[in-house]
Amino acid sequence: MELFTNFPLWAALAAIGFAQFVKVPLHFFVTKKVDWSLVTSTGGMPSSHSAAVTALTTGIALEQGVDSPFFAISTVFAVIVMFDASGVRRHAGEQATVLNQLVADFQKFAEEAKLWPKLDEDSKRKELKELLGHKPIEVFFGGLTGVLLTLLLHIL
């Protein structure tokens, strides 16, 4: 039953849910298109990874104090996750974009080949996930989301 009273855990999970959900109205505000698939996708504004780790760290700070070893562990974990979200994962997404363009170019060439029309559509194209990582601003607002949401939950 202690699991249900673990404030840092629930704050982190709430931050993930909130950050994922808020991507839909933010995307609509920018593009005027509703895309519900953003609720379960990676990448985009705000970073749910950053929201989760900062909510976890803030929750631990509030319950254990900033001098606790748990806060230290959580802080280092948050820095690594946020660095990875804006670095390695973002670059992997950029590489996926280039690879998808290469696949598209190849497909255009292959359409002119005699055998191309005989292939089924599934075997013609498999796209890689391009929206993997985050821009630094997305990581920042994800982190800010986690901190502010956790403080609000703590007050409530």
Image: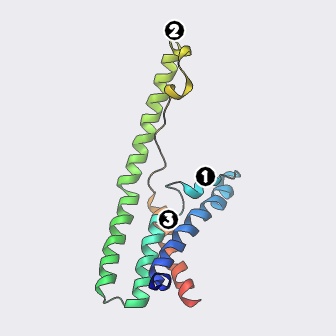
The answer to which of marks 1 and 3 sits earlier in the sequence is: 1
Question: Given the image, on which type of amino acid does mark 2 rest?
Answer: Lys
Q: Mark 1 near mark 3, Cβ–Cβ under 8 Å?
A: no
Residue at left offset 39%, top offset 41%: 95
Q: Out of 1 and 39, give the one closest to the viewer.
A: 1
Question: Given the image, on which type of amino acid does mark 1 rest?
Answer: Ser
* Circle nearer the viewer, 1 or 3: 1
As helix, strand or loop, the secondary structure at mark 3 comes to: helix
The answer to which of marks 1 and 2 sits earlier in the sequence is: 1
Q: Out of 130 and 141, give the one closest to the viewer.
A: 130
Q: Could you tell me how far apart the alpha carbons at marks 3 and 2 are, in whole angstroms?
A: 47 Å
Question: Given the image, on which type of amino acid does mark 3 rest?
Answer: Ser
Name the image colouring: rainbow
State the residue position of label 3. 48
Q: Quadrant of the C terminus?
A: bottom right
- Mark 3 is surrounded, within 10 Å at the Cα level, by few (under 14), some (14 to 19) or many (20 or more) other residues, namely many
As helix, strand or loop, the secondary structure at mark 1 comes to: helix
State the residue position of label 2. 114
- Counting from the top left corner in percent of width and height, residue 137 is at 48, 63
Residue at left offset 40%, top offset 86%: 61
Q: Out of 32 and 122, give the one closest to the viewer.
A: 122
Task: Tell me, for residue 106, which label it has, or none.
Answer: none
Residue at left offset 28%, top offset 85%: 69
- Mark 1 is surrounded, within 10 Å at the Cα level, by few (under 14), some (14 to 19) or many (20 or more) other residues, namely few
Q: Mark 1 near mark 2, Cβ–Cβ under 8 Å?
A: no
State the residue position of label 1. 37
Residue 63 quadrant: bottom left
> In this view, which residue lies farthest toward the top?
114
The answer to which of marks 3 and 2 sits earlier in the sequence is: 3
Q: Could you tell me how far apart the alpha carbons at marks 1 and 3 are, in whole angstroms?
A: 15 Å
